Amino acid sequence: MVTRQTALKIRKTHRYLGVFIGIQFLMWTISGLYFSWTDIDEIHGDQFRKENVQQAVFKNLKSPSELGPELVISSLELKEIANNPYYWINQTTLIDARTGSVKEGLTQEEGLLVAEKYMIEGLEITGIEKINSTGNHHEYRSGSLPAYVISYDTPGNVKAYVALKDGSFQTLRHRDWRWFDFLWMTHTMDYEGRDNFNNLILRGFSLLGLITVFSGFLLWYTSSPSVRKISKKIKKKQSHKSNIKA
């Protein structure tokens, strides 16, 4: 049986570990509840997107082989931007599929038309701005840049993002997604990219959590009246046997 002084040290260690780890345990529980009670499609903002996006049909397009003898094509995609056809070549160059001229990014009007194609009708636009860079905690941190941000007059502060380089509709963000992103960060404890489950902070807190649980078991063992009674009985039996042998 451990001494009273050792038992007090175990109790003190368990108490401080409980306070320190308990805050993170609370965040894990809150975020887990939020994830299990939310619809991931709503988090993605599908309720703000059109269900069926009509693709335009084009005729009389230039053949890619006619765009220039010096052009080497490794990838090619036909895109529609403001009802006009463009070739997106090698993930770097946007070329008018009718004239063969190179297009240097989208105008604001074209960005609005791209967003209009994908967003549901009835949303009032409150503003559009161009962004060239984003920080590690920006809601558009992994998207193509530069990009247009189109803001809508909604309770959830909905924003749509359109890439300038190729005119693609990148994503949309709203209040519920931002809550999800924050809670996901506290859940994974990856305060940079959000999705790294192998970061040192998470590993450290996981180990401390395990130590806290084991210290709790040890504390129960050292302070349990039942364990003390059993220990005393064992000692009495051992003492009795020693006396008999003597």
Image (cartoon, grey):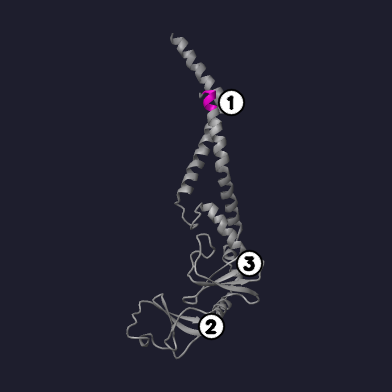
The residue carrying mark 1 is 225
The residue carrying mark 3 is 157
Element class at badge 3: loop
Residue 179: % across, % down: 60, 59
What's the amino acid at mark 3?
Asn
Label 1 crowding class (10 Å Cα cut-off): few <14, some 14-19, many 20+? Answer: few
Residue 220: % across, % down: 56, 31
Image quadrant where one finds the C terminus: top left
Q: Nearer the viewer, mark 3 or mark 1?
A: 3
> Which sits earlier in the primary sequence, circle 1 or circle 2?
2
The image quadrant of residue 61 is bottom left
Q: From which residue to which does the magenta span run?
A: 3-7
Q: Residue at x 46, y 14 (%)?
A: 241
Q: Residue 82 shows which numbered tag?
A: 2
The image quadrant of residue 119 is bottom right
Element class at badge 2: loop
Q: CA distance from mark 3 to mark 1?
A: 59 Å
> Which sits earlier in the primary sequence, circle 3 or circle 1?
3
What's the amino acid at mark 2?
Ala
Label 3 crowding class (10 Å Cα cut-off): few <14, some 14-19, many 20+? Answer: few
What's the amino acid at mark 1?
Pro
Residue 25: % across, % down: 56, 46
Element class at badge 1: helix
Q: Is 77 left or right of 236, judged from the image as shown?
A: left
